[in-house]
Image (tube, helix red, strand yellow):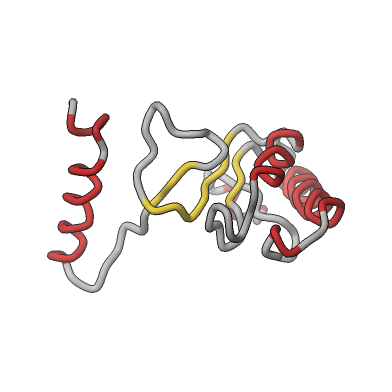
Amino acid sequence: VKALHHSGMGIGGHTVNHPILSQLDAGQARTELETGKLTLEQLTGETVSLFAYPNGKPGLDFQQGHVDMVKAAGFTAAVSKAWGVATRSSDLYQLPRFTPWDHSIVKYLARLGKIRYENSELRLR
């Protein structure tokens, strides 16, 4: 982590033990979030402001209470595993994303086209 940070890589939080947050009680989930953030901040000497939910499926792997915990822990944004592209209207604590790889260029381009078509903010540009 230190070497990645010193080479210019941004470091974000992800919990300590990669648990599915919705399977923990509130105290355990909070401890995972806060301890993970603190540990990374001690290693890098800088504030860790971004978070990625373990596994990350909204409503399954994490709930609104976990989103509130991420905010309370001092993160400024978080990514989920909701498939899509973030826009100006996206919730900063539940940003969608997609994987930028595929088994073929045709499938990759088809997925990009689908995202562009489904996202009205991108269509308006």
Residue 115: horizontal and vertical position, in percent? 25, 47
Residue 5: horizontal and vertical position, in percent? 60, 48
**As drawn, which residue projects farthest toward the bottom?**
103
Residue 71: horizontal and vertical position, in percent? 69, 34
User: What residue sits 36% from the left and 59% below the top?
Assistant: 99
**As drawn, which residue projects farthest toward the left?**
106
65 sits left or right of 122 in the view: right
The relative height of residue 63 versus residue 24 in the rendered view (above or below) is above
User: What residue sits 52% from the left and 46% below the top?
Assistant: 79
The relative height of residue 58 versus residue 48 in the rendered view (above or below) is below
Which quarter of the figure is the N terminus placed in? Answer: bottom right
Q: Quadrant of residue 23?
A: bottom right
Q: Nearer the viewer, residue 86 or 25?
A: 25
104 sits left or right of 31 in the view: left
Q: Nearer the viewer, residue 45 or 103?
A: 103
Which quarter of the figure is the C terminus placed in? Answer: top left
Q: Quadrant of residue 120?
A: top left
User: What residue sits 58% from the left and 51% below the top?
Assistant: 52
Q: Quadrant of residue 98?
A: bottom left
User: What residue sits 86% from the left and 52% below the top?
Assistant: 27
Q: Nearer the viewer, residue 11 or 78?
A: 78
87 sits left or right of 46 in the view: left
**As drawn, which residue projects farthest toward the front?**
59
Labels in figure, total: 0
